[in-house]
Image (cartoon, rainbow, N blue to C red):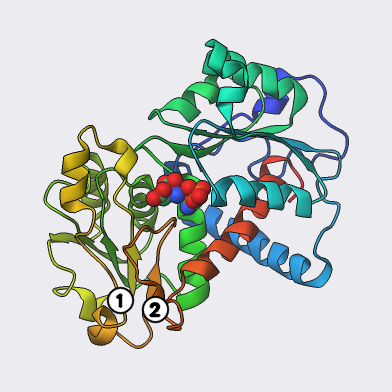
């Protein structure tokens, strides 16, 4: 992990009672997957395992009792917003939900730096989703409490990539040696930008399948290349499906298109159905960050290889782990 002075320690003379300031990640922002090394991932996933066990045994417990999370969402969300809320509440903490910024003072023109500096007076950690690349880093520059990037435009979605990787480790029992194929909107899909970067910490092969106008961005390709991870781009899934251990399907990101006619041309480029998977391995998995809007047909849901709703549940445990860690309790 990149050296980082825990922000709460730096800016506030008052260390909240009971916080372990030497805990890894204490007071840290989570802005990009570039922050993590393999050891960090093992640590996070170890804590996530413990969280899963606790949820199964007791449901809710008091690890973060007295802590408050501000959930600040400038873009729509179901999973990220609800899972951070659930994570905080299962850990005994509470949440200030600002899921509709149009009802907040943002609609009066309040800036992001002012909004986060206000919310941190009330909360111990801020989860932020915003349409602009770099918004989480900007918020972190002004806030003294930890900022967790819940998606910054077409930039990154680091906690999604962590839960995606946790899903792969839980479902496949390993990451090294796997062939992972990303399908769909690789240009605007922030989850694949984060996941491809994170996977460079492992010995994997990456395949990209996308419409011509929605390729993986050059900066991500360059980072993957620099890591020595083998990667290749294709236009049809059939070419690479038989060798894939994971296919990671994404939605064409309608909200990023300036021209709706362009979106209409590519929206149905790939549809995964039981028929599609006839040439796939028996023990592969199909993932999707969700929401899906037609890329995976519902009749695939009963196939044991359909991992996307299990992936949702893994997300809860990973986000519980992250909250406990940045708040110095794990
Ligand atoms: N929910 C994910 C995101 O916010 C993926 C998507 O919306 O397609 O990036
Ligand atoms: N996967 C994901 O980020 O879902 P939401 O957009 O519903 O939060």
How crowded pointer 2 is (Cα within 10 Å; few <14, some 14-19, many 20+) is rated as few
Q: In which image quadrant can residue 103 be found?
A: top right
In this rendering, is residue 266 above or below 4?
A: below
Q: Are marks 1 and 2 in contact (CB under 8 Å)?
A: yes
Res. 269 in view: yes
Q: Secondary structure at mark 2?
A: helix
- Residue beneath label 1, please? 273
Q: Nearer the viewer, residue 299 or 180?
A: 299
Residue 316, given in percent of the width and then of the height, sits at 63, 58
Measuring from the top left, give residue 156's x and y in whole percent.
40, 41
Q: Is residue 41 above or below residue 98?
A: below
Residue 37 visible in the displayed image: no
Q: Which residue occupies 36% across, 45% down?
A: 190
Q: Nearer the viewer, residue 40 or 160?
A: 160
Up/down of 212 relative to 262, above or below: below
Q: Looking at the image, which residue sits at the far top?
A: 109
Residue count near mark 1 (Cα–Cα under 10 Å), binned few <14, some 14–19, many ≥20: some
Would you name the residue on which mark 2 appears? 299
Residue 327 percent across, percent down from the top left:
72, 40
Q: Residue at x 36, y 37 (%)?
A: 155
Residue 200 falls in which quadrant of the image? bottom left
Number of disc labels: 2
Q: Helix, strand, or loop for circle 1?
A: loop
- Left of 27 or right of it: where is 215? left
Q: Nearer the viewer, residue 1 or 91?
A: 91
Q: Is tag 1's residue or tag 2's residue first in the polypeptide sequence?
A: 1
Q: Distance from label 1 to label 2 (Cα)?
A: 7 Å
Task: Identify the image quadrant of residue 312.
Answer: bottom right
Side (left or right) of 266 relative to 96: left
């Amino acid at each position: 992990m990149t050296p980082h002075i825990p922000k709460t320690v730096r800016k506030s003379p008052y260390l909240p009672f009971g916080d372990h300031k030497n805990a890894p990640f204490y007071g840290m922002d989570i802005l990009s997957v570039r922050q993590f090394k393999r050891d960090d991932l093992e640590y996070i996933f170890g804590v996530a395992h413990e969280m899963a066990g606790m949820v199964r045994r007791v449901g809710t417990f008091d690890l973060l009792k007295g802590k408050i999370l501000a959930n600040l969402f400038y873009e729509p969300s179901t999973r990220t917003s609800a899972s951070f809320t659930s994570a905080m509440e299962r850990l005994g903490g509470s949440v200030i939900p600002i899921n509709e910024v149009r009802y907040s003072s943002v609609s009066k023109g309040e800036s992001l730096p002012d909004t986060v500096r206000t919310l941190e007076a009330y909360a111990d950690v801020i989860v932020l989703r915003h349409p602009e690349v770099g918004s989480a880093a900007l918020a972190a520059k002004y806030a003294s409490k930890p900022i967790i990037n819940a998606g910054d435009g077409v930039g990154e979605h680091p906690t999604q990539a962590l839960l995606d990787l946790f899903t792969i480790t839980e479902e496949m029992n390993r990451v090294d040696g796997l062939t992972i194929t990303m399908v769909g909107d690789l240009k605007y899909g922030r989850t694949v930008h984060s996941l491809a970067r994170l996977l460079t910490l492992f010995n994997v092969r990456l395949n990209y399948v996308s419409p011509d106008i929605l390729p993986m961005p050059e900066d991500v390709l360059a980072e993957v290349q620099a890591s020595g991870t083998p990667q290749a781009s294709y236009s049809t899934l059939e070419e690479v499906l038989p060798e894939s251990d994971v296919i990671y399907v994404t939605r064409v990101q309608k909200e990023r298109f300036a021209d709706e006619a362009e979106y209409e041309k590519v929206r149905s480029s790939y549809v995964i159905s039981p028929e599609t998977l006839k040439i796939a391995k028996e023990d592969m998995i199909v993932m999707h960050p969700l929401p899906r809007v037609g890329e995976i047909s519902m009749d695939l849901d009963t196939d044991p290889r359909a991992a996307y709703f299990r992936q949702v549940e893994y997300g809860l445990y990973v986000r519980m782990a992250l909250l406990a860690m940045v708040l110095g309790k794990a």
